[in-house]
Amino acid sequence: MTDATSQRYNTARLEADADGISRAAEILLAGETVAFPTETVYGLGADATQPQAVARIFEAKNRPSFNPLIVHVPDLEAASRWVDLPDWAEALATAFWPGALTLALPKKTALPDIVTAGHDTLAIRIPATQVAQQLLRAVGRPVAAPSANPSGRVSPTTADHVLDGLEGRIAAVLDDGRCAVGVESTIIGGPEPTLLRPGGVAVEAIEQVLGRSIARQARTDDAAPLVPGQLTSHYAPDAPVRLNATKARPGEILLGFGAIAGERTLSASGDLVEAAATLFALLRELDGVGKPIAVAPIPLDGLGAAINDRLQRAAAPRG
Ligand code: TXA
Ligand code: MG
């Protein structure tokens, strides 16, 4: 990427009021990228019907173009226009949409290939925040959006995080404060429901709705990941990260949880929802200190699965 390409934009920070939302919709319809808040993380949106607009996402993120994107729509009616929902998917949609769940389902109506990277399934989600809902309705078209971070970095949970990574590379960011959930959506694919990525909806809650346990797709090989977000070191801070630490070793800085207090603590009361919501912001903050990061053990149940997944990637050796 040349400097000329990366500094094309005077990135606008738009307030998430009626004016800001309609300005954001105009920019999207004009084929440019806008970062917008969802309940999980900020997404970098583009009109999914315009291949050139979607290409700008990859350019801004410096993302390998084989990665398929999640398409965002405002309601189930819009979702049914783009994908076929088998019974299990309809049950999950009814239970968890709008919300932190993405379904990868057979495509029904063609979108540009660049959106799905040649897959015959489309990943689709209805985000829950008012701002995302209003934006999607104003655009009136499906919006493709990966997390709004340069490829390989932790996902942004505030507009400042977005600007940290993408200022000058995107047209605008719609600022609605901090994301409530803080980790990305749970991804379920088919043909039989299969967990492709743990995320903001606990897999236990999904299994409860379906009345049966579902397959967890084994962590894929880094060389040929089925879900490229599964690249082992995908969510990497610059600092080395050591997991399951009960205390900091000399020179380390500790990210605590529950009874283990650190320089920063994910949740002093051991609340996994609070821990998910603060995870990326605290990783960023500690990464800025310039010391190796030790992280206290986090339980694996509920949102702990998604938190541990992201932490393992943060701690993985860099390729
Ligand atoms: O919470 C979220 O999911 C956020 C917000 C913005 O919605 N988005 C997000 O997108 O995390 P991204 O691109 O960072 O991660 C999307 C993941 C990638 O790992 C991608 O490979 C996978 O979804 N994916 C996309 N389409 C797929 C498909 N058809 N089948 C399987 N996986 C797919
Ligand atoms: Mg991402």
Image (cartoon, rainbow, N blue to C red):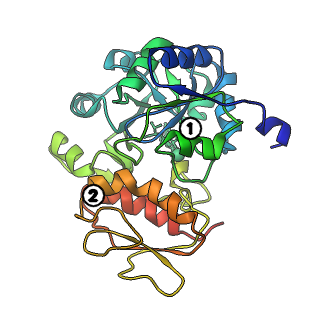
Question: Can you see residue 66?
Answer: no
How far across and down, in percent of the image, does residue 221 sit?
A: 54, 61
Label whose residue precedes the other's in the sequence (1 or 2) = 1
Label 1: how many residues lie within 10 Å, few (<14), some (14-19) or many (20+)? Answer: many
Q: Residues within 10 Å of mark 2 (few under 14, many from 20)?
A: many
Image quarter for residue 272? bottom left
Q: Which mark is residue 272?
A: 2
Q: Residue at x 54, y 69 (%)?
A: 316
**Is residue 4 among the parts visible in the rendering?**
yes
Q: Residue 254 placed where, x, y %?
A: 43, 74
**Closer to us: mark 1 or mark 2?**
2
Q: Secondary structure at mark 1?
A: loop
Mark 1 → mark 2, Cα distance in angstroms: 29 Å
Residue at image coords 42%, 22%:
73
Image height check: is 314 above or below 160? below
* Amino acid carrying mark 2 in the image: Leu
